[in-house]
């Protein structure tokens, strides 16, 4: 019986293994699986200050903070020095309280070569990417997305990213067709090739990062003045000097609707101090003010990270978001773990 089973397996797997051996599969063609798990236990006391939506609650929460799972890869093409690239990344609901276990994040396919990178899909806009690492509390309640617009991931996006020029300069541009959406908020559906456009210039060298980005006819997302579609201008800089990191971001959002005077102006300042190879202290603060409403939304946060291993971090933080004229405040205090793989 044993010999018969061995013979059966040989008949089944022999031709398959021969076929696999004949196929020119290389290590570069094998996709890479990666991910990030960010789970935190938080005590929150919200009065509805956040522009993400009114929420009044005082409770303990277990949260999955933009945890994600992805597959990415590349392989050489038989034309010139071109390489095919792809990435499929989905948000995962680690704490289990969302209706959907998976949600789409960055998804794209494209080409890479000496000319740079060309990709198409559902992708972070150049203006969002220009943020760099200035946000020290990314994905938590102290994330800048809770009080500033511009953190948009565009569907139907075609993007170009240049190689680094002059030792540190990169050009990043994108456009998206409207596909019958009212992109410019004029009451008419848009069907052009580039109804939303975004571009960024970035410079990174010797610990210095600087970026200037502009986006036209973009969803405002967060607006103190009540803007729906915005033209956004963002300037960012950060510098790493030894154990110290400093960052600053300024943003202006003007209403894309013709004749409107609605406008938001906001900024963020951040700092991190690496006490040693394991402990990092962090702080940041900023505000977003509506020019017409004169309402101001302000944020501050402080925290500490403890590096458990190269890809594992424990953290604690406190944050406050305050809406001035409304007199409402949102408070959060939490601790959590971040694992990357």
Image: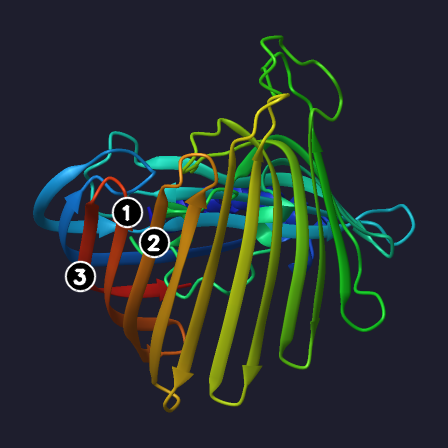
* Contact? badges 1 and 2 (CB < 8 Å): yes
Q: Give me the C-alpha separation between circle 3 and circle 2.
A: 17 Å
Which badge, 3 or 1, comes first in the chain's sequence? 1
Q: Is residue 1 visible?
A: yes
Q: Residue furthest top?
A: 188
Q: Which mark is residue 41?
A: none
Image coordinates for residue 112, horizontal then vertical, percent: 78, 51
Which badge, 3 or 2, comes first in the chain's sequence? 2
Q: Nearer the viewer, mark 1 or mark 2?
A: 1
- Residue at point 84%, 65% (across, down): 165
Which badge, 1 or 2, comes first in the chain's sequence? 2
Q: Nearer the viewer, mark 3 or mark 2?
A: 2
* Contact? badges 3 and 1 (CB < 8 Å): no
Classify 10 Å Cα crowding around label 1: few (below 14), some (14-19), many (20 and above).
some
Residue designated by label 2: 298
Please give the count of numbered marks on the rendered protein.
3
Classify 10 Å Cα crowding around label 3: few (below 14), some (14-19), many (20 and above).
many
Classify 10 Å Cα crowding around label 2: few (below 14), some (14-19), many (20 and above).
many
Q: Which mark is residue 333?
A: 3
Q: Quadrant of the C terminus?
A: bottom left
Q: Is residue 31 visible?
A: no
Q: Dot 2: what SS?
A: strand
């Amino acid at each position: 019986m044993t010999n018969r089973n061995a013979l059966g397996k040989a008949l089944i797997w022999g031709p398959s293994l021969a076929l696999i051996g004949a196929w020119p599969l290389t290590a570069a063609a094998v996709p890479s699986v990666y991910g990030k798990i960010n789970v935190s236990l938080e005590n929150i006391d919200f009065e509805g200050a956040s522009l993400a939506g009114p929420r009044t609650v005082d409770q303990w929460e277990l949260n999955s903070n933009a945890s994600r799972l992805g597959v990415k890869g590349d392989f050489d093409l038989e034309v010139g020095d071109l390489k095919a690239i792809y990435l499929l990344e989905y948000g995962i609901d680690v704490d289990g309280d969302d209706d959907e276990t998976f949600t789409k994040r960055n998804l794209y396919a494209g080409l890479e070569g000496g000319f740079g990178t060309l990709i198409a899909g559902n992708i972070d806009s150049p203006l969002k990417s220009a943020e760099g690492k200035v946000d020290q509390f990314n994905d938590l309640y102290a994330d800048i997305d809770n009080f500033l617009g511009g953190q948009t991931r565009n569907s139907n996006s075609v993007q170009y990213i240049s190689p680094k020029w002059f030792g540190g300069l990169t050009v990043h541009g994108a456009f998206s067709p409207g596909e019958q959406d009212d992109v410019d908020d004029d009451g008419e559906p848009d069907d052009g090739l580039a109804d939303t456009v975004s571009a960024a210039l970035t410079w990174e060298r010797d610990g210095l990062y600087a970026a200037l980005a502009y986006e036209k006819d973009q969803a405002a997302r967060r607006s103190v003045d009540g803007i729906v579609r915005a033209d956004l201008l963002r300037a960012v800089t950060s510098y790493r000097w030894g154990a110290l990191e400093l960052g600053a971001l300024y943003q202006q959002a003007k209403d894309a609707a013709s004749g409107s005077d609605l406008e938001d102006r906001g900024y963020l300042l951040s700092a991190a101090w690496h006490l040693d190879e394991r402990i990092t202290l962090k702080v940041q603060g900023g505000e977003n003010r509506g020019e017409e409403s004169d309402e101001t939304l302000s944020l501050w946060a402080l925290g500490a990270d403890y590096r458990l291993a190269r890809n594992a971090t424990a953290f604690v933080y406190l944050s406050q978001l305050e809406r001035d004229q409304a007199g409402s405040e949102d408070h959060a205090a939490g601790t959590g773990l971040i694992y990357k793989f």
